[in-house]
Image: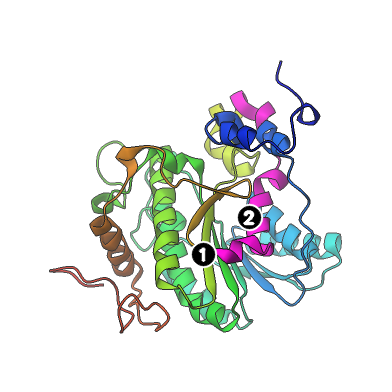
Amino acid sequence: MLPKADEVPRDSHMLDRILDKSLLGYTSLGYDWRALDPIQEDLRGRTALVTGASSGLGKQSAAALAELGAAVILVGRNEAKTSSVASRIRAQTSNPRVYSEVADLSLMGEIRKLAERIDAPIHILVNNVGVLLPSRTETSEGLELSFATNLLGHFLLTNLLLPKLRDSAPARIINVSSGGMYTQRIEVEDLQNRRGRYDGAKAYARSKRGQVILTELWAERLAGQGIVVHAMHPGWADTPGVSRSLPRFYRVSKKLLRSPAQGADTIVWLCAAEEPLKSSGQFWHDRKPRPSHRLSRTRETNEERAALWEALCRYSGWDGTPDLLSAREDGACPPKKGAGC
C-alpha cells in the first residue's frame, strides 16, 4: 500500500529526488508527498495575461492570481465562455480587475490584433494555451494546428508583448510545457508534422520541447532586461484537455491525476514568488528546477536552436526588430546562410 502524505517525511530532499525520477512524482501522490506551502504573496499592482484561460490550468491559474490581488486578463477563443469565466472569477475572488480578451491563438493575424488591443502594463505573461489533436489539421493560415497553437503562437505573442514586459520590469514569462517533452527532440525540418503518419501525442510533445528551447533562448537574449523566463510542467492533471485528448490515459489514471489547483500550483508560484526572479531559463516542476533533458537522444545542437528561432520568425512573420532582443545589435534573427527571417 502506498503511504499517505502525512506518513512521508516533510523535509526529505531524498524523497524529492526519488519522485523526480519516478512517474509517481507526476501524480497527486507526488504533489501531496512534497507538501508544498500555500502561496501567500501579494500581487496587488501587478497585471497578468493568461492564455487558454477559459478552462483547465489556465482558468485555475487566472483565479489564483486574482485571489492574490493581481489584475488578470484572460485570453480565450470563445467569447461567451471566456467572459463567463472572468465574471465567475471576479465574484469568487472579490477582485473587480479581471478582464477577458477573445483571440484564436493559432492564428497569427489574431495574435497581432490582440497585442495591439492590450493597452495595460504587463508584468506577468502565462503562455498556457495548447492543443493535442487526433489527426493533422491546418489553420486557415495554412499552419499545422498543434504547432501553430503550442509553439508558434507563443513565440509571436511573447515577442510582440516584450516592450510592455520590459516597461513593467521586473516582469516574468511563464511557459506551460509538459513532461511529455522529455520523450522528443525538436525536428526543425518538420515543425509542421508532415512526415510519416501523424501522431498527435508526438506532435504535442515536440511542440513542448520547442517551447522549452524557446524559454532558454529568450533567457539568453533578455538577460539584464528585467524579464525572467521560465518553463514548467504541471504533472498529470485532471483537466478537460486531458480527458478529451487522451481518453484512454484518462480512464486508466483518473484516480491518480492531480486536481487543477495542484497542476497550476507551480505556474502561480513562478508568477508570484521571489525565488524565480533569481534565475532565468529554468524548467520547473513542483517549485524546483528540473533537467530539461532526461535522454541524450533528445538533445538539440546549437545550430538547431538557431534554426528553430529563424524558422519561427519566418512562419510567424515576426521580423525580430525590438531592440531588447539583443542577440545581435540590430535585434534580428540569428543569421543562417541562404535564409532570412
Q: Tell me the mark number nearer the camera, choosing from 2 and 1.
A: 1
Q: Which residue is drawn at 28% across and 66% down?
A: 310
- Residue type at mark 2: give it: Ile
Q: Can residue 107 be seen in this view?
A: no
**Image check: 167 left or right of 219?**
right
Mark 1, Cα crowd under 10 Å, few <14 / some 14-19 / many 20+, is: many
Q: Are marks 2 and 1 in contact (CB under 8 Å)?
A: no
Q: In which quarter of the image is residue 262?
A: top right
Residue 229: image tag: 1
- Residue type at mark 1: give it: Val
The magenta span reads 251-279
Q: Where is residue 263 in the image (x, y as percent from the top left)?
A: 65, 45
Marks 2 and 1 sit apart, C-alpha to C-alpha, by 12 Å
Q: In this view, does 311 lie above or below 250?
A: below
Question: What residue did someone put label 2 on?
Answer: 267
**Image check: 72 left or right of 326?**
right
Q: Could you say whether the residue bearing mark 1 is in a helix, strand or loop?
A: strand
Quadrant housing the C terminus: bottom left
Q: Can residue 92 be seen in this view?
A: yes
Mark 2, Cα crowd under 10 Å, few <14 / some 14-19 / many 20+, is: many
Q: Which residue is drawn at 45% across and 66% down?
A: 219
Q: Could you say whether the residue bearing mark 2 is in a helix, strand or loop?
A: helix
Q: Position of residue 15 (x, y in %)?
A: 64, 32
Q: Position of residue 301 (x, y in %)?
A: 26, 52
Task: Name the foreground residue: 16 vs 245.
Answer: 16
